[in-house]
Amino acid sequence: MTGFVDKMSVCMKNKIKSGLLFLGLGVFCAGVFAGGSSVGYRELFPNDKGVDWPLEETGWRVHVGNTALPLQSDAVRVSWVNGRPGNLEAVESFPANQETLRGFLFIHNLGRSQLIWTDEVDLEIPADRRMEFSWYQSTDGADAAQPAVCIDGTWYVSSRKFGDGRGFSKMTVRFSDGAWQKLDFAENRVLAPGAAAGLTGNRLEAVGFYVPNLTAKIRIDTVEVRLGELTPEMAAAEELLQGFVLPPVNFSPGAEYGPAVRNYQGIPGIESAPGGRLWATWYAGPVWEDRFNYMLVATS
């Protein structure tokens, strides 16, 4: 067995004891997400400054009322309180940094309709219209937000109204859904939903949220646009991985991981692939079971 084990080992450094779970999750999700869905845009609204930020700091803006007046005030801002989820990275958004957990879009009552939006997005829409727009939302009272998109210069708003009460919940709308209508929007001129209409065009140029007559507060975090659509299995895997930090994989382990220095080994597992190929995995370390352990995977 020693020759097989050392023939082709892969070492995974493990700083916490649940490394085996990480390995299983990593393999599982690699299979689930392969060829499925990818994030083309992600805004995290990060803020670890200890004070609220103006909305403009993130590349988003707001227009209010029936005449779409541009607004610069603290009525819409980036809060420094914890949002959801954590451990993600920005994708094509500003500021482009790692999620700090703190920070979310905080929308106050203005007594008028609002469009909060950004033109950071620039994505080609697939011919099959398989794209998703998702975000996390917490709402006070009975207020609701409607996702809005701009395609080839034309704005649309979802006919669905999203509200959930207190606590951040994930919301998703698909471009292939039929529940869309035109959104008449021109700065200093008009902001009003129009007639029902299907999404047409080839280029996504902006995304945002239309909030009619807000009476309380809405909190929004982790806005994403995905190329492709999440299956139930993909969504479950994504939820399971929230908060996990997968350890790096070393595909060319050196002598520092060889048999001579693996004084502690245990907890093995072995599996046979359909074609007869054998796979083995086990824990190892220099002395005993501790935080410096790592995992190895070998194949015949």
Image (cartoon, rainbow, N blue to C red):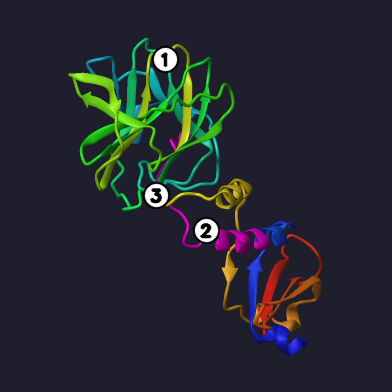
Query: Of residues 28 and 105, which is closer to you in this image?
Result: 28
**Residue type at mark 2?**
Phe
Quarter residue 182 falls in: top left
* Residue indicated by mark 2: 33
* Residue 209 appears in the figure: yes
Depth check, front residue: 127 or 210: 127
The amino acid on which the numbered mark 1 sits, given as a three-letter code, is: Leu
Q: Which residue is drawn at 44% across and 11% down?
A: 215
Label located before the other in sequence (1 or 3): 3
Single out the mark in the foreground, 2 or 3. Answer: 3
Q: Which residue in the rendered view is the most extreme toward the left?
A: 189
| Mark 2 to mark 1 CA distance (whole Å) | 37 Å
Mark-to-mark CA distance, 2 and 3: 15 Å
Q: Which residue lies under the disc numbered 1? A: 214
123 displayed left or right of 172: left
Q: Quick check: 58 above or below 286?
A: above
Closest to the camera, between mark 1 and mark 3, is: 3
- Residue holding disc 3: 130
Q: In which quarter of the image is residue 205?
A: top left
Q: What element carries label 3?
A: loop
Q: Which residue is drawn at 47% across and 36% down?
A: 135
Q: Quadrant of the C terminus?
A: bottom right
Q: How crowded is mark 2: few (under 14 residues within 10 Å), some or many (20 or more)?
A: some
Q: Nearer the viewer, residue 39 or 295?
A: 39
Q: Residue at x 56, y 47 (%)?
A: 235
Q: Looking at the picture, does residue 206 appear above or below residue 4?
A: above
Residue 27, magenta (yes or no): yes
Residue 60 placement: quadrant: top left
Q: What residue type is labelled 3?
A: Arg
Which residues lie in the magenta part?
Answer: 23-49
